C-alpha cells in the first residue's frame, strides 16, 4: 500500500477512532490528543501496523498500545469538577473492562476483534465486557430527558433507560418542546436526535439547554453521524448511530452518567 493509499484508508477510519477515544476519556480534547498520538506513531513507524490485515483493527491496536503505555492518564486542565470526580470513579473499575465495553458496544467489534485490539484472548475480552456492564450498570441513577421525533424510537429509548433504573422526565419532539420540558425538571442526562419533527435541530436545542443549565452530559442518537464527526468543530463525546442496539444505548448511558462532556456544537 502506498503512503497516499494508507493515508486515505486511515482517514476513513479516523472519525471512529476519535469517537472511541472521546468516549473513553470523556473529553473531546483528551480523546483527540490520543488519536493524534496514534497517527504520529504510524507516520513515524509504519511497522506498527504489521501483523493485521484489517486496517481498522490495526489502527485501534496502535491506539491501545499508546493508551496502555501512557498509564491511561486523562488531561484535566479543561475538566470540570464533575469530570474529575468521574475519572476518579472510573479508575476504580476493573482494569480494561471499560475499553472492552466501548469497543463492543460503540464500535461494534466482535469479541475476537476486541481481543486483537487489546492483545488478550477472546474469552478474556468477553469476560471484560460482562464485568463492565455489571459494574457500570449498578452505579449512578438519574433523570433522563429524551429529544426524539420518532415516537416508536422514543418509547424504545424510554423503556431501555427505565429498565436501567433511571427516571425519564419526558419526551420532546421539537426544539421548543425540549426547552419547555427541561424547564419543568432539570435532567441529569439528555438523549437527543439531531433532526426533529418540525425541521428544528436537536443540536440547537441541546446548545440552548447547556447554555442555560450548564454541565449536562448528552448522547446523540442519529441516523446522520457524519454531520457531527467532521473534525473541524466541537463534537459530542457520546454518539450512537441509528439503527442502534439496546446494548449500545445501555453502555453509552452508563458512560455518560459519569461525564459532563458535550460542548457547544454546530451542524
Image: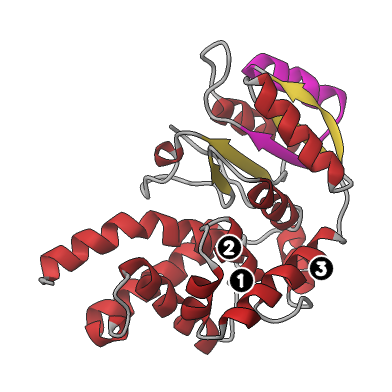
Left or right placement of residue 85 versus residue 21 in this view = right
Q: Residue at x 36, y 47 (%)?
A: 232
Q: Tell me which colouring the rendered structure shows.
A: secondary structure
Label 1 element class: helix
Q: Can residue 217 be seen at all in this image of the molecule?
A: yes
User: Where is residue 23 drawn, in percent x and y?
Assistant: 58, 59
Q: Is residue 165 left or right of residue 101?
A: right
Name the residue that disc number 2 marks: 104
Kindly indicate whether the residue at mark 2 contacts the one at mark 1 (C-beta within 8 angstroms). Answer: yes
Residue depicted at 13% across the width and 71% down the height: 3
Cα separation between marks 1 and 3: 13 Å
Badge 1: how crowded within 10 Å, few (<14), some, or many (20+)? many
Q: What segment is highlighted magenta in the picture?
A: 174-192
- Name the foreground residue: 190 vs 125: 125
Neighbours of disc 2 within 10 Å: few (<14), some (14-19), many (20+): many
Q: Nearer the viewer, residue 161 or 84?
A: 161
| SS label for mark 2 | helix
Q: Which residue is mark 3?
A: 135
Amino acid at each position: 500500500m502506498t503512503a497516499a493509499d494508507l493515508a486515505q484508508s486511515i482517514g476513513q477510519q479516523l472519525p471512529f477512532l476519535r469517537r472511541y477515544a472521546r468516549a473513553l476519556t470523556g473529553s473531546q480534547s483528551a480523546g483527540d490528543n490520543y488519536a493524534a498520538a496514534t497517527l504520529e506513531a504510524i507516520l513515524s513507524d509504519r511497522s506498527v501496523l504489521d501483523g493485521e490485515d484489517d486496517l481498522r483493527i490495526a489502527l485501534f491496536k496502535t491506539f491501545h498500545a499508546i493508551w496502555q503505555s501512557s498509564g491511561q492518564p486523562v488531561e484535566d486542565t479543561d475538566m470540570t469538577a464533575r469530570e474529575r470526580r468521574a475519572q476518579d470513579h472510573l479508575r476504580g473499575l476493573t482494569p480494561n473492562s471499560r475499553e472492552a465495553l466501548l469497543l463492543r458496544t460503540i464500535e461494534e467489534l466482535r469479541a475476537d476483534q476486541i481481543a486483537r485490539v487489546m492483545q488478550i484472548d477472546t474469552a478474556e475480552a468477553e469476560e471484560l465486557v460482562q464485568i463492565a456492564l455489571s459494574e457500570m450498570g449498578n452505579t449512578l441513577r438519574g433523570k433522563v430527558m429524551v429529544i426524539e421525533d420518532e415516537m416508536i424510537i422514543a418509547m424504545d429509548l424510554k423503556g431501555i433507560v427505565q429498565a436501567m433504573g433511571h427516571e425519564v422526565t419526558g419526551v420532546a419532539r421539537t426544539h421548543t418542546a425540549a426547552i419547555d420540558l427541561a424547564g419543568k425538571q432539570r435532567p441529569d442526562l439528555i438523549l437527543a436526535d439531531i433532526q426533529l419533527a418540525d425541521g428544528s435541530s436537536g443540536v440547537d436545542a441541546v446548545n440552548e439547554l447547556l447554555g442555560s443549565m450548564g454541565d449536562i452530559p448528552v448522547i446523540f442518537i442519529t441516523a446522520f453521524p457524519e454531520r457531527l464527526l467532521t473534525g473541524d468543530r466541537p463534537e459530542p463525546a457520546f454518539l450512537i448511530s441509528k439503527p442502534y442496539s439496546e446494548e449500545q444505548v445501555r453502555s453509552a448511558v452508563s458512560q455518560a452518567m459519569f461525564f459532563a462532556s458535550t460542548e457547544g456544537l454546530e451542524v
